[in-house]
Image (spheres, rainbow, N blue to C red):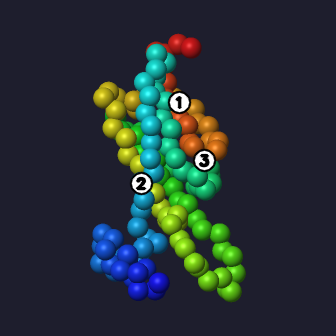
Amino acid sequence: MAESVERYFRLMPMGRKQRPAERTWCPAADVYQTQYGWIVKVEIAGVRIDELEISIEGSTLRIGGCRRDTFYGETVSYHQIEITYSRFEKTLQFPSRIDAATIERDYRDGLLILYLRSSEDKL
């Protein structure tokens, strides 16, 4: 088993001197355009809301943060690890500028939901 894990990490693309836990991951996202603006859903289960960084510059939305593993004690022997625990970043490009938009956010069931509305949009 240890041999297959080592082979897995050797095949993964990463920079020199970078441990697997230091790599960033990119969560899945859905983007919807509505009559009121945009809705962005990002799959970030296990990320604390206070660990999120959201910024807009021009037509680019950046969402970043960190999903941390829970420490279970010194006597833990991992059998299988598939969930990525590290820093993540998601960058989304929109067809027009969104930097004047207001952002409302909701976080439920592992999904971050952002509502981007420009000042001209009326509800």
Q: Which mark is residue 74?
A: none
Which residue occupies 67% across, 85% down? 74
The image position of residue 110, as x and y in percent, is 60, 47
Task: Judge whether residue 42 can be spotted in this image.
Answer: yes
Numbered disc in front, either 1 or 3: 3
Structural distance between the alpha carbons of marks 1 and 3: 16 Å
Q: Nearer the viewer, residue 2 or 51?
A: 2
Q: Secondary structure at mark 3?
A: loop
Q: Secondary structure at mark 2?
A: loop
Which residue occupies 52% across, 64% down? 83
The image position of residue 89, as x and y in percent, is 43, 53
Q: Is residue 32 above or below residue 36?
A: below
Q: Nearer the viewer, residue 9 or 93?
A: 9
Structural distance between the alpha carbons of marks 2 and 3: 15 Å
Kindly indicate the quadrant of the structure image that contains residue 72: bottom right
Q: Which mark is residue 26?
A: 2
Kindly indicate the quadrant of the structure image that contains residue 14: bottom left
Sequence order check: which comes first, mark 2 or mark 1?
A: 2
- Judge left or right: residue 94 versus residue 70: left
CA neighbours of label 1 inside 10 A, class few (<14), some (14 to 19), many (20+): many
Sequence order check: which comes first, mark 2 or mark 3?
A: 2
Q: Secondary structure at mark 1?
A: strand
Which residue occupies 53% across, 60% down? 66
The amino acid beneath tag 3 is Gly
- Residue highlighted by disc 1: 115
Task: Judge whether residue 14 can be spotted in this image.
Answer: no
- Residue highlighted by disc 3: 110
The reply to whether discs 2 and 1 touch (Cβ–Cβ < 8 Å) is: no
- Judge left or right: residue 96 versus residue 32: left
The amino acid beneath tag 2 is Cys
CA neighbours of label 3 inside 10 A, class few (<14), some (14 to 19), many (20+): some
CA neighbours of label 2 inside 10 A, class few (<14), some (14 to 19), many (20+): some
